[in-house]
Image (tube, helix red, strand yellow):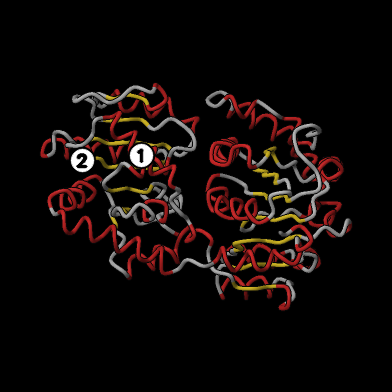
């Protein structure tokens, strides 16, 4: 079965090249560094350290506190971060700088993976959530390199897909050294697929361990001063997808009639959509600027397009309330705990299946406001802006949920320690 899988992956390569080139029309990063995707990374990484793989932005963001702690506990060990997307790459580099080195993870082809691991020779490999590649797992098992799946989650739908190929996947799951699962449900699904019970531990969700670094707070203070925003209320629509900006801009148009000084920060999820969102904002006749230009909004600026990478937490920090995108369309939503860390109210659409348990917790604690269209978005934001006590309390409820469920990072570090014990101080 592994041979069939590998042959199919080789056949897919021309389609993958075409897709990368096509996406490169709007984001040049997709046309760059293709050699890394086939394991050519000599001179770009340091060997004999920790390899952590986070497929894209969400997983990278969850991994940042873990990486900082690993660097603090094991300062002599190099840390290599791999992603599959340019956005994940940009976030890793902008957030962690010289603390890490970064390359793309090779496609799951035997020669590419072998070439990659011949260079990197890691002492430990950590994969975030569920990015499991058969050839990579087999190679690590053969080379006796421990593999930990951190912040592991597995939806019922994904588990059922794996079960279809259970004769093939069971042996792969048994080769995983350790699974650090988010919940009891995730743990049981991994066990049902072949992970040994003794090789799985429930640690909780790393996304609750987001922290605001002092330097970010200072940057936010300086940005507010630069933008001269003392008297203006700000709402942010973050990680938006196609179909959502239209709704958001319609709501903002209505809000400006009652709150003429209100400023919207609109942050599309994918860089390749920055230009189309600028065009749409202009089409709605808003006075807007792009964050990438570095200029401060004037008194007449109505919208700031967040077209920079690695600044979302900074933009949350200067906002009074947040709409989290991917939720008004059937994408499943993005991480609501990022704005929760800044003690601001959170609004989302009805489609939150990517963060089902987190959103359930927030709702149970009156810390998540659900909207469905421009009218409800306008109505809920109006209430938040006119009722200061309600706005502040809703943000505080969200922060309390975040604080109450911290601890996964501490649990995970304990599990990792035996594999790096000789490197500790």
**Relative to 302, does residue 5 appear above or below in the rendering?**
below
User: As drawn, which residue projects farthest toward the front?
Assistant: 425
Seen from the viewer's position, the closer of residues 317 and 273 is: 317
Residue found 21% across the figure and 55% down from its top: 391
- Sequence-wise, the earlier of marks 2 and 1 is 1
Q: Position of residue 43 (x, y in %)?
A: 79, 31
Left or right of 270? Residue 44 is right
Q: Is residue 7 visible?
A: no
Instruction: Identify the image quadrant of residue 90.
Output: top right
Within 10 Å of disc 1 (Cα), the crowding (few <14, some 14-19, many 20+) is: some
Residue 308 - label? none
Seen from the viewer's position, the closer of residues 218 and 57 is: 218
Q: Secondary structure at mark 2?
A: loop
Q: Position of residue 340 (x, y in %)?
A: 36, 56
Residue 233 - label? 2
Which residue is tagged 1?
220
Q: Position of residue 92 (x, y in %)?
A: 58, 41
- Quarter that holds the C terminus: bottom right
Q: Secondary structure at mark 1?
A: helix
């Amino acid at each position: 079965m592994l041979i069939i899988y590998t042959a199919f992956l080789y056949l897919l390569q021309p389609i993958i090249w075409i897709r990368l080139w096509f996406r490169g029309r709007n984001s040049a990063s997709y046309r760059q560094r293709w050699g890394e995707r086939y394991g050519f990374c000599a001179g770009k990484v340091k060997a004999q350290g920790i390899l952590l793989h986070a497929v894209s932005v969400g997983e990278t963001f969850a991994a940042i506190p873990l990486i900082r702690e690993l660097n603090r506990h094991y300062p002599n060990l190099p840390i290599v971060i791999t992603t599959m997307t340019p956005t994940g790459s940009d976030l890793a580099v902008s957030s962690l700088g010289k603390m890490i080195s970064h390359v793309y993870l090779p496609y799951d082809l035997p020669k590419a993976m072998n070439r990659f691991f011949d260079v990197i020779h890691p002492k430990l490999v950590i994969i975030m959530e569920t990015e499991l590649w058969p050839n990579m797992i087999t190679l690590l098992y053969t080379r006796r390199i421990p593999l930990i799946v951190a912040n592991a989650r597995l939806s019922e739908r994904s588990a059922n897909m794996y079960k279809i190929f259970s004769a093939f996947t069971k042996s792969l799951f048994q080769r995983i050294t350790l699974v650090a699962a988010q919940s009891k449900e995730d743990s049981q699904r991994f066990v049902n697929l072949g992970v040994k019970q003794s090789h799985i531990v429930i640690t909780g969700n790393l996304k609750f361990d987001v922290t605001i670094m002092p330097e970010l707070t200072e940057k936010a203070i300086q940005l507010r001063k630069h933008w001269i925003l003392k008297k203006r209320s700000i709402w942010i629509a973050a990680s938006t997808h196609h179909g959502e900006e239209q709704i958001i801009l319609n709501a903002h148009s209505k809000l400006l009639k009652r709150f003429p000084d209100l400023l919207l920060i609109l942050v599309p999820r994918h860089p390749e959509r920055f230009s189309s969102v600028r065009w749409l904002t202009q089409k709605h006749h808003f006075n807007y600027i792009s964050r990438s230009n570095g200029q401060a909004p004037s008194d007449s600026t109505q919208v700031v397009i967040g077209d920079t990478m690695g600044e979302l937490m900074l933009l949350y920090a200067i906002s009074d309330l947040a709409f989290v995108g991917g939720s008004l369309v059937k994408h499943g939503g993005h991480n609501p705990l990022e704005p929760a860390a800044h003690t601001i109210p959170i609004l989302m659409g009805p489609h939150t299946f990517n963060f089902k348990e987190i959103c359930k917790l927030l709702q149970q604690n009156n810390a998540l406001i659900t909207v469905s269209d421009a009218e409800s978005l306008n109505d809920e934001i109006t209430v938040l802006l006119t009722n200061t006590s309600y706005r502040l309390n809703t943000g505080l409820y969200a922060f309390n949920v975040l604080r109450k469920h911290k601890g996964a990072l501490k649990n995970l570090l304990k599990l990792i320690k035996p594999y790096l014990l000789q490197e500790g101080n």
